[in-house]
Image (cartoon, grey):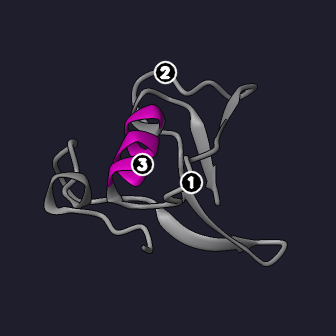
């Protein structure tokens, strides 16, 4: 039986609209969230690796939250 998401798992736990951008990195799907906010950490970035489900809205919103706290964030599938 193939794996299927049920309604409980397909809905995002975080709310809002994503603010980052979908990109490709060496042929792989990725999502980038630019650092913003009062304190931008110029010497620090976050490499966010999702679970087996891959990039979905909840993980994008988490990356956006890291970015809102000043961290350039790359979500790489």
Q: Residues within 10 Å of mark 2 (few under 14, many from 20)?
A: few
User: In this picture, is 43 found above or below 58?
Assistant: above
Residue drawn at the location 44% of the way across and 74% of the way down = 2
Q: Secondary structure at mark 2?
A: loop
Residue drawn at the location 25% of the way across and 53% of the way down = 9
Q: Secondary structure at mark 3?
A: helix
Outermost residue to the front: 1
Q: Decide: marks 2, 3 in contact (CB < 8 A)?
A: no
Mark earlier in primary sequence (2, 1): 2
Separation of marks 2 and 3 at Cα, in angstroms: 22 Å
User: In this picture, is 41 found above or below 68?
Assistant: above
Choose top left, top right, bottom left or bottom right for residue 19.
bottom left
20 with respect to 28 (left or right): left
Q: Percent position (x, y) of residue 14?
A: 22, 42
Q: Which residues are magenta?
A: 58-66
Q: Decide: marks 2, 1 in contact (CB < 8 A)?
A: no
Per the image, the residue denoted by label 1 is 52
Per the image, the residue denoted by label 2 is 39
Per the image, the residue denoted by label 3 is 59
Q: Percent position (x, y) of residue 28?
A: 73, 72
Outermost residue to the bottom: 27
Separation of marks 2 and 1 at Cα, in angstroms: 32 Å
Q: Residues within 10 Å of mark 3 (few under 14, many from 20)?
A: many
13 with respect to 36 (left or right): left
Count of residue discs: 3
21 with respect to 76 (left or right): left
Mark earlier in primary sequence (1, 3): 1
Q: Is residue 59 magenta?
A: yes
Q: Percent position (x, y) of residue 77?
A: 64, 60
Separation of marks 1 and 3 at Cα, in angstroms: 12 Å
């Amino acid at each position: 039986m193939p794996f299927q998401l049920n309604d409980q798992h397909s809905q995002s736990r975080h709310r809002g609209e994503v603010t980052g951008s979908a990109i490709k990195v060496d042929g792989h799907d990725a999502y980038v969230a630019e650092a913003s906010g009062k304190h931008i950490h110029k010497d620090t970035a976050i490499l966010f690796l999702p679970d087996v489900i891959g990039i979905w809205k909840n993980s994008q919103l988490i990356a956006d939250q890291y970015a809102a706290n000043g961290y350039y964030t790359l979500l790489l599938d």
